[in-house]
Amino acid sequence: MTLLHFFRDGLRAMFQGGKGYWTWLALLFALIAIGCWYYIIQLQQGLVITGMSDQVSWGFYIANFTFMVGIAAASVLLVIPAYLFHREDVKRVVLIGKAMAVAAVITAILLVVVDLARPDRFWHIIPFIGRFNFPQSMLAWDVVVLYGYLFLNLLIPFYILFKHYRGLQPKLAAYLPFVVITIFWAISIHTVTAFLFSANSGRPFWHTALLGPRFLASAFVSGPALIIVSLLLIRRYWKFQIGQAVINMLGIILMFALYTNLFFVGVELFTDLYNETDHAASIRYLYLGLHGFDGLTPWIWTALVLNSIAVLMLSIEKLRHNIPMLVVACGLSTVGIWIEKGMGFVIPGFIPTPTGEIFEFTPTFPEVMITVGCWAIGALVFTLLARAATAIESGDCVHQSLARDSR
Amino acid sequence: MNHPAHRCLVLLVCVMAGMTGTPAAADTNNSAPEFQVAPRTSAFDSSPCEGCHEDMEPNPKRRVLEDAPHFPEVQHGPADIWCTTCHSLDNRRSLRTLSGQLVSYDESHIICSQCHASVYRDWQYGAHGKRMTGWQGRREILNCTACHNPHTGPDQRPRRPEPPPGVRIDLEHQHQHRMHHRNGPTWERHQPAESEDADVSR
Amino acid sequence: MSRDKKSKPSDPNQVSHSRRSFLKGISTVTAAAGSTAALKPAWGGSSLGDALGDFFQDQYQRMTPEEITNALERIERKAKRKFGRDITAENTPPIEGVVFGYALNISKCKGYRDCVSACVRENNLGRGSQMEYIRVVELDKGDRNLDHADHYYNHDLVPQEGKEYLPMQCMQCDDPPCVKACPIDATWMEPDGIVVVDYNWCIGCRYCMTACPYSARHFNWSEPLVPSEELNPDTHYLGNRPRMKGVVEKCHFCIQRTRKGQQPACLEACPTGARVFGNLLDPDSEIRYILANKTVFRLKEDLGTEPKFWYYTD
C-alpha cells in the first residue's frame, strides 16, 4: 500500500510546477510528437528516409547513441565521492546524477531501436525466446550491459527514495554492494560500447586499443558538463539546496578529463600521420580532407577549438568558480564532445569504405527530428525523475503518515 | 613429354573419332581431368573445303592469298607461321602438327599446345578457359578457337562495359565522382616535373 | 537430396514440398486454400495467417522440416500476390563432402561487368535500389591499393590501357567477422562453406556491415523492387527468394544453383572465362589445381578472415 502511495505521490511531484516548468514539459512533448510522426514515416518507408547508405551504414542515430552512453556512464563520478568517500554534499545530488544516467540509457536504447530497420522483429533478440549471440557478439554484450545498468540505476535510487519517503534511513549494507557493482558497471557500459567499434579489425580508424580510454575520457567531459548545468538549473529554479563544493568538484573533474581528451586527440594524430599508412585515411579525411572530400573538416576543427577554449577557461580558477563562465565552458565542451564522438568518430569509420570508396554522409531532416525526439524523451525522463527525487530528498514529498504526524 | 609415336597413335584415334563427329575424352596425360570439347567439324557441312579445293593445285609457296574467301594472311603475334604451319595441304579437312601428323578440327587444341604448352596445361586443368557444364560431373570446355582466332591475333576486342554501380535512392545528388589525385609511378617522382600535371589528366 | 521432402503431411493442406511442375499446381491451389482466401492481402502482401506465421517464425537453424516447408509456402504465396508470378522456394541442403571455393583470374578480367548484371537478374536484386552484390573496380596496373581504386569507371571501352580490373563480392570467409558480429545469429556459415543470411530473422541492425572488411554486405534501405516479368522463379530460402526492406543480403555463391551442381550466374556470364568455381575438398577439382599451381592471393590476407575467394594470374 505504501508502495502505491510512493508511486502516486512521486507522480504527483513530477507534475507539480509553475509556468516555466510546464512550458519546458510542453516543449518536450512537442518535440516527442514530431519525432514520433517522423518515426511512423520511417516505419512505413524504411530507413531510406535517412541519409545512411551501404557505404555509411550507421549514421546520426548511432552517433548520438555513442554520445548518450557516455553521459550515462558519467554518473559514476558522483557515485564514487558520495558512497566511497562519504561526501554528504555529493550524496545529496547523487540521485540526480542517477536520474541522468537512467535518462541517458533510455535515450541510448531508444536510439538503437529507431536505428533498427525491423523493430517488428524485436523478439528475436530476447535471450532463450529469440536467439541471442552472447558472448560472441559485441552488440549482444552492449544489450546486456545497458539493460543491466538501467536496472541498477533504477534499483538503488528506488531503495533510497522509498526509505526517505517513509522517513527511514537506507541501510548502507543493503545498497553498498549494488553501488560498487554500479561503479564497475558504469565503466563497463562505455568500454563495451567502445569494443563494439574497436572489434572491427577491418576498420582501422576504430581498431585501436585507445578507443576504450578515449570514450571514457570524453564521457567524463560531457557527463559532468551536463550534470553541472542541470544542477545549477535545479538549484536556481527548483530551490533545491546544492553545495557549491559539489559543482567545483565536478568542474575540476571536467577540466582534467578535457586535458586527457585533448591529449588523446594529439596521440591519435601523431600515431596516424607521422609515418602515414593507409590506416590513416579516415583521420586524414576527418581533419584534412581526402581526395577533395572534406565534409567533416569544419566540424572537427570547430570541436577542437571549442574544447580548447573550454579547457583554458576551466584551468583558470576564477573562471571555473564563476557560474556563468562555468556554464559557457560546459556548453562549449558538451558541443565539442558531441561533435567529436558523433560525426568525428562514428562517421569517419565508414569513410573511406574498406574497399576504398569515399561516400559522404549528411543526416536528413527526418533523421534529425527522430533523434531530437529521442533526446526529448531522455530530457523528459530526467526532468520527471529529478523532480520526484528532489521532492523526496528535500522532504517535500513524504508519506502521508509522516506529513500528518508532523502537523 | 609424349613420345612422337605415342602421340601419333592418339592423334589417329582422335582423327578417327573426329570423322565420326564424337570427340574423344581425355589426353593420355592421365593426371589431367577428363573433359569434352564442343565439336567444330559440323562446320564442314555448310562450307565443305572440297568445293573449291578439289580443282585447285596445292601451292605451298608462302604468299598473300588474294581472292580467297578466308584469311589472306596470318597475324599470329610475333610467330613466324603461315597457313600450312597448321593446315594440311593434302587433307583440307584436317589440321597438321609441325611434324606433319594429322589432327581433327575437333582437337585443334593439340595444334595450339605445340607452342602454348603452359597455357595448354592450364586449359586442361581448368585454370584457363571456361567450363560450360556444372562445377561437378561431366566437364565440357571450349576449344581454343572458340575465344582465340589464330589468324587475326589475340583476344576479344575492347567493348563498352555495363553501367557503373548505382547510388542509393535519394542520395544521387550527394555523390560526386571525383577522380583521385594519385601519386604517379615511383619513377615519375624522380624525374623533373613536366609542364602539365601528369596525374590530374588520368 | 531433400531435407525438404516430407514423408507424411500432417495436414492435407500442407503439401510436402517438391518442385515438380504438376505438384506446383497443387501447391498453388492448396496455398490459396490454406491462406483463407477470404482475407484480403493487407499485411505487406500477405494474408493475416501468413503475416502471423512470418512473425512467429523461428530462426532457420532451429526450424523443424515442417516449419521450413510452411515458410517456403508462405514465400511462394507472397510472391504470387506481390508479383503475380508462380515461384518455387526450395531448401536444397548442402551436398556432403563439398566446400565451395572460387577463383578469379585478374589477368583475364576486362572490366565488362557482365558478372554484375547477371547476378542482379539471377538473384532478384532490387532494381530501383541499385543493389549489386559484385563490385568491379579499376586499378592502375601494378597498384593494388584499394584506396586508389575507381569504383565508378564508365569508359567507352574496356579494358583501358594500363589498367587492371578486380571484381569483389562476398569472400565467404572461413572465419567470418560478420557471423561473430550478428547479435541474433541471423547469419552463419553453412556446412558447404557459404555464409548465408536468414532474411526472415534479420532485424536490420547492420552491425554485420560494419564488421565486413570487404564491403560485401548490402542493405535494403527500402522495399526491393523487381519487375515482375524479370523475376527469377527458381529460388532458395537462403538465396535468391524475394527479400523485403530492412534486411541485409549479399552474395551467396548462387546457392540455388550451386547446390544443384550448376555454376554461379557470374561465372556463366563471364565471357573471358576468368572465373572458376568448385569443391575445395575435391583434390582433382579445377579450383584445387589453381590454388596449387598458379600465383594466387586473397584480399586483406592479414586480417585472418580466410576468404574462400582467391585471385590468380595467368
Image: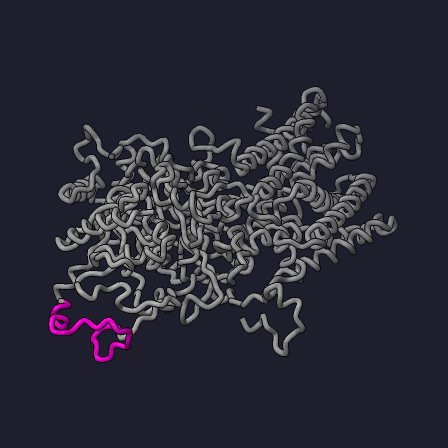
Nearer to the camera, A370 or A61: A61
Residue sitting at 30 percent across and 61 percent down? B147
Q: Is residue B146 visible?
A: yes
Percent of width and height locating residue A150: 59, 34
Q: Is residue B59 magenta?
A: yes
Left-right relation of A68 to B100: right
Percent of width and height locating residue B52: 13, 73
Residue sitting at 71 percent across and 50 percent down? A271
Nearer to the camera, A253 or C71: C71
Residue sitting at 60 percent across and 25 percent down? A2
Percent of width and height locating residue A391: 69, 36
Examine the residues drawn in magenta and state their main secondary structure.
Answer: loop
Quarter of the figure with residue B87: bottom left
Residue sitting at 40 percent across and 56 percent down? C131
C34 up-or-down from A84: above or below: below
Left-right relation of A119 to A292: left
Q: What segment is highlighted magenta in the picture?
A: B49-71
Q: Does the magenta stretch include residue C261?
A: no
Quarter of the figure with residue C259: top left
C9 up-or-down from C223: above or below: above
Percent of width and height locating residue B25: 22, 46
Callout count:
0
Left-right relation of B81 to B196: left
Nearer to the camera, B155 or A39: B155
